[in-house]
Image: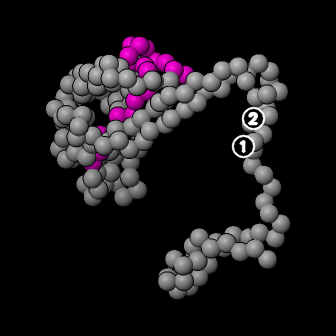
Amino acid sequence: MITNEYGIHTFSLKFQCKYSEIQNIIEQNECIRTGKGKSGLSSYYQMPQFKSIGVEIHLGQSISHPCWLILIVNPSSPLASTYEPTALFQADEKSVQQLKHHLRNILDKIGVDRRLKGFKLSRYDLTCNLYYDRKADVQDRLDIFKKSFPILHYSAVKFGQYSNSNERFKGANKHSSS
């Protein structure tokens, strides 16, 4: 192995909004509808404007469920003002303040008057980039994660095999080995 780098690759911030707040964001900005709930009561949108600087914005709008504004951030990208998919963020006080400033500006541009403190951290991807001299070393590392053969005489108990609902829940994650 030549070198390794570690840091934060991506994190996700979530904010629960009212239906009307999400509707205002959709009406004021360029949004792409990406999906619809099964019952037709939910809609999902993305805002592509900030993807080039590593910030994805997802909106979830529903009549029957909570509505969400989700920021998926590659923190190295806004600081570089360009998408840096392999860069890993090393947090220090100055860079965190700069990142908060960039995110605050993005929220202002889309018409969201909420403090970042109100957002919840919902995902945090710590990453370690490994660089190798030889391709064989890469393959050796990948083989560690390769799916192995199942254990002999192993069978999973399928969910829904039971007629009684109590039995069904008890047996949902039960596995047997004979």
* Location of residue 149 in the rendering, given as x and y in whole percent from the top left corner: 80, 55
Position of residue 42 relative to residue 168, above or below, is above
The disc at residue 141 is: 2
Secondary structure of the residue carrying numbered label 1:
helix
Q: Residue at x 22, y 40 (%)?
A: 118
Q: Which residue lies furthest to the bottom in this view?
A: 164
Return the residue nearer the eye: 26 or 71: 71
Q: Which residue is drawn at 29% across and 22% down?
A: 97
Task: Determine whether label 1 and label 2 are within 8 Å by CB.
Answer: yes
* Location of residue 109 in the rendering, given as x and y in whole percent from the top left corner: 22, 22
**Residue annotated with mark 1:** 145
Horizontal side, residue 132 vs residue 58: left or right: right
Which stretch did the figure color magenta?
67-87
* Location of residue 92 in the rendering, given as x and y in whole percent from the top left corner: 37, 23
Q: Which residue is drawn at 34% across and 54% down?
A: 40
Q: Name which residue type carries label 2.
A: Arg
